Amino acid sequence: MQPFELSLTEASRAVRARELSPVELTESVLARIAAVEGRLGAYVTVAADAALAAAVRAEREISGSGPRGPLHGIPMALKDLIDVEGMPTTASSRVRAGHVAERDSRVAERLGAAGAVLLGKTHTHEFAYGLTTPQTNNVWDHTRVAGGSSGGSAVAVAAGGATFAMGTDTGGSIRVPAALNGVVGLKPTYGLVPRTGVTSLSWSLDHVGPLTRTVQDAALVLSATAGHDPRDPASVSGPVPDRFPGGDLRGLKVGVPRNHYFDRVTPEVEESVRGAIDRLAELGAELVDAEIPMARYLQAVQWGLMVPEATAYHERSLRVAPDLYTADVRILLEAGALTSAGDYLRAQRARTMMRDAWARMFEEIDVLAAPTVPMTAAEAGQEAVEWADGTTESVSDSYVRLCAPANITGVPALTLPVGHDRAGLPIGMQLMARPFHDATVLRVGRAYEESVAGAGRLAPLAA
């Protein structure tokens, strides 16, 4: 096995045991990027020289006083919304051409303090306003979408071009590409990981979180990045998990949705996810039917919040340089200007009602288990999906439909791979829990992961 093939947990153990140096690991990952990036388009920029210099420093520090923690000397990537002092933050947009960050984001600062080695910046759907990331190809089939908006981060991790990566999630933008590329993605509780220095899409829905090979990897990154930051008005002083036991799930109640989450999903997705839920029962969990409250209003509330907030953020640049935006993003931003204050306030009130209703639902269950997305990776350029019930849905609406509830309610949500369709494309299961019970979704995900073979292995890169 080459060093780039190691999961974060495996690489960290090898570095701690002095069986692998940070330089060797970083050189291996950089060589992998050079070999596959032309086919994938995951990166906006690769800072190879800076990464190697950081790896040399990490190796020297570890040899001297030992590792600071599990991320010391581990190469990683940041979505190109996350500021790093002296590096461009382009948001994969011509609007941001020439923009260079003046200081580190809080996430970059914390990862740097943990000793992680920055490889570069990964592509996002422009300003994170989309679910496909058109610049980037799916690892499993290059003719299919990578998912978005954190498509570059997901593909880099799935291909071995980063040991872990950070993304953002406003309506599924970590979980969608993670599911479509067969990796793990975690959207933490709202406010648990600070967003200071991270370009916003929709301030009341934005989250920052990791994309990794395994659930244990995601837990390690969460521990390093979570915690209150007074510079982020939404940041909270919630509990930062530091232990993530696996093992059996006795005494845990897993909710299985009766509505919404299995409506309009492909048979292969339903079969794989229900099979994974049955595995949770074999591990000791009690399965409980769960009714998703206010399900018919979920997408309307998501768009009712996100669209006007995004337009408000881009108001000046949209007025000054509208032609620099891609057409799909510009149309959405212009549409946001037509949203009335009354409609926005109604969406805010509906969100409050949904949060209360979900809190009551979680009084009866510990975790909700469901599909992450209703179908596997769509073909590049595909605009719509025709469902068996005769309805037609846009690809973006399809991908956001099952992810958005966790953004609206702010609950933690984890996706992990649980199977493949007939074309060999990966399928993801989503686990959600009440706010600040991030450790619970990680516990359940890790227990499932430990019970199946091959967790954390790289995707077989398409030709």
Image: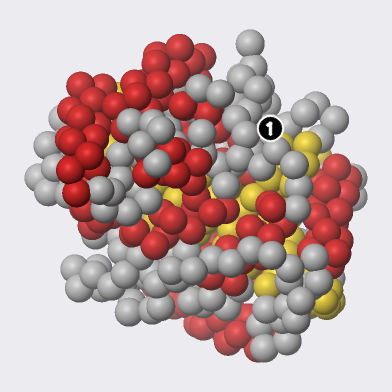
Vertical order, 164 against 447 (above or below): above
Q: Quadrant of residue 327?
A: top left
Image quadrant containing the N terminus:
top right
Q: Quadrant of residue 120?
A: top left
Vertical order, 83 against 171 (above or below): above
In the image, 214: left or right of 54?
right
| Crowding near the residue tagged with mark 1, few <14, some 14–19, many ≥20 C-alpha atoms within 10 Å | many
Kindly identify the residue that appears in the image at 80 percent across and 65 percent down. Answer: 283
Percent x, y for residue 371?
73, 55
Q: Label 1's element?
A: loop
Percent x, y for residue 401?
65, 56
In the image, 334: left or right of 288?
left
Percent x, y for residue 14?
43, 38
Image quadrant containing the C terminus:
top right
Q: Which residue is mark 1?
A: 378
Is residue 192 among the parts visible in the rendering? yes
Kindly identify the residue that appears in the image at 48 percent across and 58 percent down. Answer: 219
